[in-house]
Amino acid sequence: MTRRTPDASNPSSNTQTLERTQIQRPRLYRVLLLNDDYTPMEFVVMVLSRYFRKSAHDAETIMLAVHRKGQGVAGVYTREVAETKVAQVTQHARSEGYPLRVVAEPEPST
C-alpha cells in the first residue's frame, strides 16, 4: 500500500513523501497423516482424494509414504485452513471408527 503524506517540516511545501507498507506472506503449515496399524489404506486414499483433492495416483503415493515412512504430507496451507482440514479428517476418521492421526505443523523456514 502506498500513502502520500505532506512534508511536515515545511507546511508551505507541496512535496510529498511516499510510505510503503511491507506485506508479509502468512506462515504456511503442513498437514501430515501419521501411520497407525488400524486405519485401512483405502480409507487414507479416500481422505486424500476427498479432503485434499489429490488425484488417485497422488493419493496412492502419499498413502504409501504414510505406510512406509510413518507419515506423509497431505498438503501445505495457511494455519486456519490446515487446522480446519485436521478437524474435518479427524472427525470423519472417528465417525468411521479409525484412529487416524492428522496434525498440522509449521513449514520449516527457508
Image (tube, helix red, strand yellow):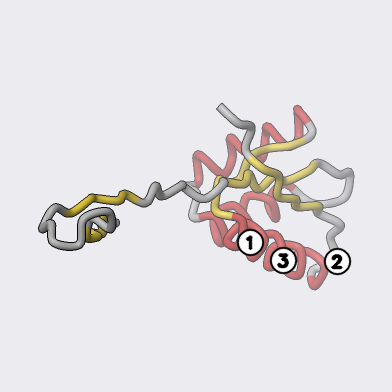
Picture disc at residue 70: none
Q: Quadrant of residue 6?
A: bottom left
Query: Is residue 101 rendered to the left or right of residue 54?
Result: right
Give percent across and percent down for residue 28: 57, 46
Report whether residue 75 is seen: no
Picture disc at residue 97: 2
Give percent across and percent down for residue 23: 41, 50
Q: Relative to residue 89, is residue 56 depicted above or below?
A: above
Disc 3 from disc 1: Cα separation? 5 Å
Q: Of residues 41 and 22, which is closer to you in this image?
A: 22
Q: Secondary structure at mark 3?
A: helix
Query: Is residue 18 rendered to the left or right of residue 52?
Result: left
Tell me which numbered mark, 1 or 2, is placed earlier along the sequence. 1
Total label count? 3
Residue neighbourhood size for the residue with mark 3, other residues' Cα within 10 Å, grouped as few (<14), some (14–19), many (≥20): some
Task: Tell me the quadrant of the picture where the C terminus can be found.
Answer: top right
Q: Amino acid at mark 1?
A: Lys
Report whether residue 44 is seen: yes
Residues under numbered marks 3 and 2 in contact, where contact means CB atoms less than 8 Å apart: no
Which mark is in front, 3 or 2? 3
Disc 3 from disc 2: Cα separation? 15 Å
Q: Amino acid at mark 2?
A: Gly
Point 46% across, 47% down: residue: 25
Which residue is labeled 3 in the image?
87
Q: Of residues 71 and 39, which is closer to you in this image?
A: 71
Point 63% across, 50% down: residue: 45
Which residue is labeled 1 in the image?
85
Q: Residue furthest bottom?
A: 95
Q: Amino acid at mark 3?
A: Ala
Q: Residue furthest left?
A: 14
Give percent across and percent down for residue 7: 23, 55
